[in-house]
């Protein structure tokens, strides 16, 4: 029965992917990849089938096979027992956003002017606001944090990771002892069907959190996958102590996501576009708690 269901859902997923690809071709939205030999298509977020497809950062790596949200948690790789994570130096943490305009569902209290589907350049209403809240909470716990708000999306969303890497390199050169890099995102979902995809903690709606870890399969300069995964796994375990549903499965991808810059690189999806901004802000309190419980300051 389960295998039959998986086959059916996989078929639906593949058909939706094909439809969106054909739609993109008609719209002229195909872009060339970083490597000239690869051709990429980007799912149109306004498509009726867009909720079935990966968010833009996943589509940019052309990895659809991992995005089937229907079957609960996968069995991930296990972090090494006894792994210790620590930060030191003049600055401990960089928070930045490869996809700076990612925004949340408007609920009447946080209306914004859209620059695209579920996107806005208003940093008080997009993922930058979530990053600012996380910075404040981490600083209250003694971490020294930089929050970079550079818009890495122009001139083309498909190459945003190239520009966010430049930002990371800039701070790495300026603060060579900085250890932890956090690329904060929000994921994509079916806005109508996923409005209540939250956990309730202390009476508040909290957006669920997911970590993405890249293997850098196509790159010579690969990330330290084991180290990055171990940190993501430890944080996932810590967050799940608040509620077993707080996190979604760690998503392992063939892409790199600039996680080759350090052995403590995190790509964190704080909710999705069916959540409200307040849902995401509520989650940052627990994310900061989990980081503080996991990462030791050794100055």
Image (cartoon, rainbow, N blue to C red):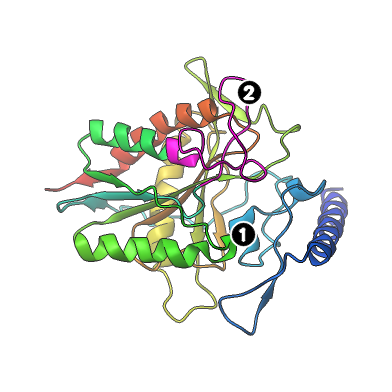
Q: Position of residue 12 (x, y in %)?
A: 86, 54
Up/down of 249 relative to 196, above or below: below
Q: Which residue is mark 1?
A: 58
Disc 2 element: loop
**Would residue 147 appear left or right of 70 to someone viewing this image?**
left
Disc 2 versus disc 1: distance between alpha carbons?
A: 27 Å
The magenta region covers 101-129
In the rendered image, residue 12 lying in the magenta stretch gets the answer no
Within-10-Å neighbours for mark 2: few <14, some 14–19, many 20+: few
Within-10-Å neighbours for mark 1: few <14, some 14–19, many 20+: many
Of 80 and 50, the residue lying toward us: 50
Q: Position of residue 163 (x, y in %)?
A: 44, 64
Q: Which residue is mark 2?
A: 107
**Would residue 114 appear left or right of 128 to someone viewing this image?**
right
Residue occupying image coordinates x 71% and y 35%:
191
Residue 3, located in which quarter of the rendered image? bottom right
Number of marks in the rendered image: 2
Of 203 and 157, the residue lying toward us: 157
- The tag on residue 81 is none
Badge 2 or badge 1: first in the primary sequence:
1
């Amino acid at each position: 029965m389960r295998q039959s269901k998986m086959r059916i859902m996989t078929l639906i997923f593949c058909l939706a992917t094909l439809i969106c690809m054909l739609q993109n071709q008609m719209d002229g939205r195909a872009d060339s990849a970083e490597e000239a030999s690869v051709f990429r298509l980007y799912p149109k977020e306004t498509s009726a089938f867009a909720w079935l497809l990966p968010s833009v950062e996943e589509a940019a790596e052309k990895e659809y096979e991992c995005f089937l949200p229907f079957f609960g948690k996968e069995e991930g790789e296990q972090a090494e027992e006894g792994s210790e994570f620590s930060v030191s130096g003049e600055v401990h943490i960089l928070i930045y956003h490869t996809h700076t305009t990612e925004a949340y569902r408007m609920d009447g209290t946080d209306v914004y002017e859209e620059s695209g589907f579920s996107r806005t350049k208003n940093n008080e209403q997009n993922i930058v606001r979530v990053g600012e809240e996380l910075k404040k909470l981490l600083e209250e716990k003694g971490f020294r944090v930089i929050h970079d708000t550079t818009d890495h999306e122009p001139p083309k969303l498909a190459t945003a990771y190239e520009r966010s890497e430049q930002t990371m390199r800039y701070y790495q050169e300026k603060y060579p002892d900085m250890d932890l890099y956090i690329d904060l995102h929000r994921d994509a979902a079916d806005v109508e069907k996923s409005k209540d995809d939250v956990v309730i903690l202390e009476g508040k709606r909290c957006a669920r959190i997911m970590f993405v870890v890249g293997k850098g399969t196509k790159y010579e300069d690969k990330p330290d996958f084991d180290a990055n995964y171990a940190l993501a796994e430890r944080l996932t375990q810590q967050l799940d102590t608040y509620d077993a549903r707080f996190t979604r499965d760690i998503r392992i991808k063939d892409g790199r996501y600039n996680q080759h810059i350090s052995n403590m690189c995190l790509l964190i999806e704080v909710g999705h576009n069916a959540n409200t901004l307040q849902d995401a802000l509520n989650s940052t309190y627990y994310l900061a708690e989990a980081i503080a419980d996991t990462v030791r300051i050794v100055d």
